[in-house]
Amino acid sequence: MAGQYLQTHFTPKVLASQKHYYGREQLVLPQPERDPFTEDEISFIASRDSFFLATVTSEGWPYIQHRGGSAGFLKVVGQNQLAFADYAGNRQLLSTGNLAENNRVAIFLMDYPQRARLKIMGYGRVMDAREHPETARLIAGPAVEKIIERIFQIEVVSFDWNCPKYITPRYTAAEVSEAIEPLQRRIAELEAQIKTRS
């Protein structure tokens, strides 16, 4: 767990819960204001084709939304900065509205086959893509910039890698297709051999 993540989330009530259930509380030392990404986080983020984004409503309720796209659509644009293009959806704009009032966000990224998960917390803001076409081009490329409605930018405070315990491996259609391709090739070879013998 990165230091700032631990310091932020291990509140007095969390520490009291640790002591109640396990007889001790974890030591929390002062940490830097931000935990910078390493190459591990950067490459993991670049390989993801989806994530979950959590914001907070004006009433204090958490709101979680799924985001998906081509691998790498969530981009690391600085040592502690993320960005992604937001396209037309169901027109509810819940995350956008929430961020206008409370800019705290959490992102949850999963790699099911490798049983790995990365949690990120930070401060988010939303930019109207029509007012920032150059940024939209940088984030999504010129081929799709006309359908981008918004750009989400996140100033990362910290992150945490969770253990693989209880993650059920799941595979995309592309991953399954890649895995069975050698088997299909071998089946085709054997079928061809059978045909030549009969």
Image (cartoon, grey):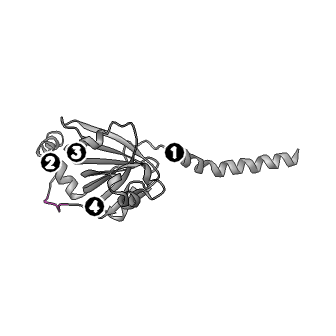
Query: For this view, does 139 lie left or right of residue 3?
Result: right
Q: Which of marks 2 and 4 is nearer the N terminus?
A: 2
**Magenta stretch: dominant SS?**
loop
Mark toward the viewer: 2 or 3: 3
Mark 1 is surrounded, within 10 Å at the Cα level, by few (under 14), some (14 to 19) or many (20 or more) other residues, namely few
Provide the residue designation for mark 1: 172
Q: Residue at x 74, y 48 (%)?
A: 188
Tell me whether circle 2 and circle 3 mark residues in contact (CB < 8 Å): no
Query: In the rendered structure, which amino acid carries the disc numbered 4?
Result: Asn
Q: Give the CA distance from mark 1 to mark 4.
A: 29 Å
Q: Give the CA distance from mark 2 to mark 4.
A: 29 Å
Q: Earlier in the sequence, mark 2 or mark 3?
A: 2
Tell me where the magenta segment starts and ends, as one range.
29-33
Q: Which of marks 1 and 4 is nearer the N terminus?
A: 4
Tell me whether circle 1 and circle 3 mark residues in contact (CB < 8 Å): no
Percent position of residue 35, x then y: 24, 61
**Label 1 SS:** loop
